[in-house]
Every structure is written in C-alpha cells, then in structure tokens.
Image: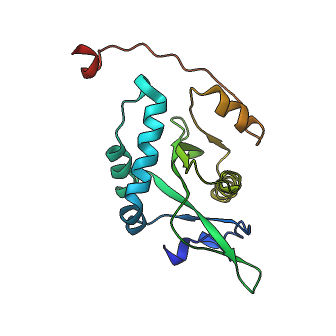
Amino acid sequence: MSELTTVVDGGANGHAGIEHPTSAVQLGSEADLRLNWPFIRRGLVAIKKRQGWRSTWRPEHVRDAIMKGHAELWLGYPATATEAGTTVPHGAPIAFAVTQPMIDPFVHQALGWFVWFAYKDPLDRSDIVRVMDDYLEMVGRFRGYQFLEMLTAREGLVRRLVKHGWRKTLSVVRKDLWLDQDEED
C-alpha cells in the first residue's frame, strides 16, 4: 500500500480522511495494481458479465488505462482502530473503484469525475461502499469537480445510489453498427 495515499489519519493530498472502524480507502499505486490484480480482474470480469452484450472493454483495457495514468484505482480495505483513535487499512482489499476526470469539451477543464467501475467483494458485509462513496465525494470536492457520474443499466443499482444522494440524469441509447465477433459464429 502506498503510504502517501492512505485516506485515514490525514489522507492523500492533505484530505481530512474518512475514518470508520471497519473500512479505509486509499489511492492505489502501480504496485498495488500488480499486487491486487487477481482480485481486481475478478471484479472486472463479474462487472462485465452483468453488463452482457453492452461490454466492449476487457479487464486489460482498464489495467492499461490505470498504468498509463488515464484512470485512477481506489482500493477499499478492512481497517482496525488505533490507540490514537484513527483507523488503518489491513489485509487485502474488499472493494475497488476506477475513476477518470470528465473533461468538458467547451471549457477544456475537468468539471466532473466519472466512476468507470465500482466493485465490492460479494461476501463482504461491511459498509465499504458507503465509505468509498463518501471518500470519492470528498476527493471530488477537494479537486474542484462539480459532480460524480457513472453509467449503469441496472435499475436496482440506480435505486440504491439515489438513497446516497445520486440522481438519474439521462438515458443513453445505442445503435450497434457492427456485429460482435462472438455473434457472427
């Protein structure tokens, strides 16, 4: 884990940090990506399966985007309380998110922050999703973004996100121009 990016006990870039007795979030480094790639890949494959035919990406595309600095990896960990009253991450990650700034084409600035992927170990029963959502909101505000945004075709996820302050803002329609290679066979 990268010491400079742990969000508890001061956090990355001078953030106050989100402290919770069971969870901690940190910005992942290239070493974190390599070390945790089996878990991250497993989560990306699960997301891709849920998306079904809508998926044109591969897990390796996501890894490459992170490695090239086009996306950021956020890791959620179980945590323990210290004597000083802070929490510190320990063990393997139980959740992750991949984010990218959204560059406005007219002002050429990052006005929003896109949550490309978010995954939680289905066996985990902690509140890591809330902790990660709270932390990404805090980091987004710190960076000057006006909003967080994600795309999903899962209405159940939309209903859960609305309970946490998200709102549905648009519908996306798509017309495929080419058949997928798998569909041709």
> In the picture, residue 23 is in which quadrant?
bottom right
Q: Quadrant of the C terminus?
A: top left
Identify the residue at image location x=70%, y=38%.
161
Q: Nearer the viewer, residue 103 or 128?
A: 128
Residue at image point 71% right, 52% down: 130
Query: In the image, is 16 to the left or to the right of 119?
Result: right
Left or right of 109 in this view: 20: right
Which residue is at the far left?
A: 185
How many numbered marks are there? 0
Q: Tell me, what colour scheme is on the image? A: rainbow
Determine whether 182 is above or below 129 in the image.
Answer: above
Q: Quadrant of residue 68?
A: bottom left
Q: Position of residue 54 (x, y in %)?
A: 43, 25
Residue 8 visible, this orientation: no
Q: Residue at x 40, y 61 (%)?
A: 33
- The relative height of residue 99 versus residue 17 in the rendered view (above or below) is above
Query: In the image, residue 32 lies at what x, y percent?
Result: 42, 66
| Residue 81 drawn above or below residue 74 | below
Q: Position of residue 64 (x, y in %)?
A: 33, 51
* Residue 118 vs residue 65, the one in the foreground: 118
Identity of the residue furthest to the front in this view:
123
108 and 75: which is toward the camera: 75
Point out residue 122 in the picture as x, y percentages from the top left corner. Answer: 57, 47
- Which residue is pictured at 43% across the width and 53% down the height? 40
Q: Can residue 90 be seen?
A: yes
